[in-house]
Amino acid sequence: METYLASMLICSGIFFIPPLLALVDQGEIWNSVTMAHEGESATLSCFESPPTSSVLVTWKVMPVGGDRWSYLLSAKCNDGRTEGYKSIVFENSTFEISTDASLIFKASAPGIYNCVIKHGDKNLQEKTVLLALVKLTVTPQLPVMVDRTLRLTAQVSPTSVVAWGTWVSPRGEQLYTEITRATGVLLSKLPRVTIRESGVYTCRIGVHGNSGTSVSEHRVNVTVKQKVFIFTQVKYEISRSMASISYSLVTLSCPPVLGDYVVLYWEHPDSTTMELVFQFDRWRRSFTNQSLPHLHLIEPTTLAAAGNFSFLLKPALKNGGRYLCEVYLNDKAFIQQSILSVLYGTAKTSPSSLELACSYSQRSQVRSVRWSHVQNPSHPLQTTGVQGQIKTSVALPLTPETAGQYACTLYLDNGNSVQYIYSEQMSNIGTTVVPGSAVPPADSVSTSSHVSTLSLLLFLIPMIAIAVGVLLWRQGYCITRRRIVQSLSRHSVEVENIYENPDDLRQQTSPQGTVYMDLKPTGEMDVYKELDR
């Protein structure tokens, strides 16, 4: 109804059209969407079902965002076929009506096209088609060299028709695709392209329409030649020099660019050995962490930060060194160097002293390292040093002057510093186990207790035996029986155990002083059973 009123007002010279751009954005004034490549031939059909009588077909056009229809051409059709061949030049484009009343022209701009079929003064059919243009671009120029960044771009106009979109590889894999709604651009990249990635790539675009969402496919053939590309546009960022306590978080920054992929190299501390430790391709959505388990990529939290790379590292002492972060954007490389020194402190106690030591890596950028007493900086400390380590010793027990905090401070050539703090109070010595100290085995105390108990038992057993013997002798219970031989003997000072040398005891015939009994079984009766009796 709105379209009919608009046409009537235009014919009468009165100009008023509802806001068509808003209608276009809402998809409310067209019956279908046709997508064509910019600069190529487009065909818009008119008949939903061919009429059986002679009719008049009229085509008109309105640019997207415009507010008036422009007449193109019309032709008579009989039994679904036009009479004669009609054409017109409009805004430097040639429009033609084919034999089935379809409109044929070279697509140069998006627009809304209206076809009306009349029989006499009666409208039999009316169809409105939105022509959307898609422009496919492949860069760099084909054939592309190995290791270059292949860029696949599809730009759709008007942008409002795009519901979704994705690029598909020759093997049918969906590539990561970024859609910029404001410009209608669907972009996918293949960084460091290989010869195996040649083939036909397809851009699938979901298109809004009155009848729902349809899918439009557009293809481009990509060839990759074997010649390897060499990056010549390389930018070096300012080198960073920093220090850290071992196993505390450190940020390794990368160049601040929206890169396609990133690689991180690590030169081991105080050496020239370099290795690849991390690589990430944000378009193929793949990453590899080679050798550092405590290294993590910081993911961007917003779309605006996408492509800005940095890493979090919890370094051990051996993880100091030189880190090179290389970010690649299209055919340009950006490099950021970070030099990291790591400080690691230890402490252990002995009966007479508290031994403090701190080790450090990447010595090339270290200006000095020293121990100090935090509460009493003037207190002199004797230190000894070897390559990459410095030690100091504090006499025990601690005094009010020596108790407190001890700091190992590492100073870099650029003035930055990092500090390891060790705290010890007087009451802690002997009760606090510090890292690196020698801890006695858990069973050492129980072992000494067992030894003491055993010694006591070995002492008591002879005494008990002597007491029992004297008691039996005095009470008259030592009766000579048929199976027991009784003999009396005097205590011999050379014998410490009555069970060790009974023959020596028998030589003492005079039962004076302490009396011992040597009982020998003469048959099946056990001597201990006799004693019990």
Image: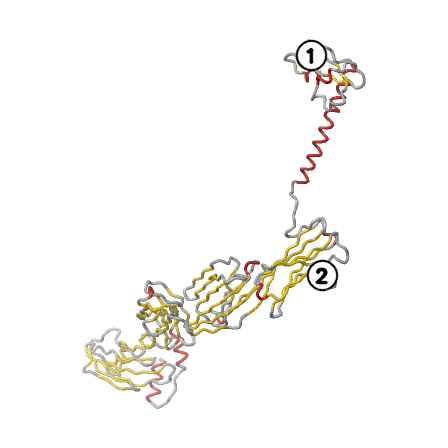
Picture layout, residue 43 above or below residue 396: below
Using the rendered view, name the quadrant where residue 530 is placed.
Answer: top right
The spot of residue 301 in percent (x, y) is 51, 67
Question: Of tags 2 and 1, which is closer to the observer?
Answer: 2
The spot of residue 112 in percent (x, y) is 33, 80
Q: Residue furthest right?
A: 513
Q: Nearer the viewer, residue 138 or 344?
A: 344
Does residue 295 appear left or right of residue 56 in this picture? Answer: right
Residue 373: image tag = 2
Disc 1: which residue: 484
Q: How is the image coloured?
A: secondary structure
Q: Nearer the viewer, residue 229 or 363?
A: 363
Picture layout, residue 351 above or below residue 278: above
Picture layout, residue 519 above or below residue 207: above
Using the rendered view, name the quadrant where residue 393 is placed.
Answer: bottom right
Neighbourhood count class around disc 2 (C-alpha, 10 Å): few under 14, some 14–19, many 20 upward:
many
Q: Amino acid at mark 1?
A: Ile
Which residue sits at x=73%, y=55%?
A: 425
Does residue 143 appear left or right of residue 319 in this picture? Answer: left
Q: Secondary structure at mark 2?
A: strand
Does residue 303 appear left or right of residue 222 in this picture? Answer: right
The spot of residue 167 in percent (x, y) is 36, 68
The spot of residue 245 in percent (x, y) is 61, 61
Quadrant into which the C terminus falls = top right
Neighbourhood count class around disc 1 (C-alpha, 10 Å): few under 14, some 14–19, many 20 upward:
some
Q: Amino acid at mark 2?
A: His
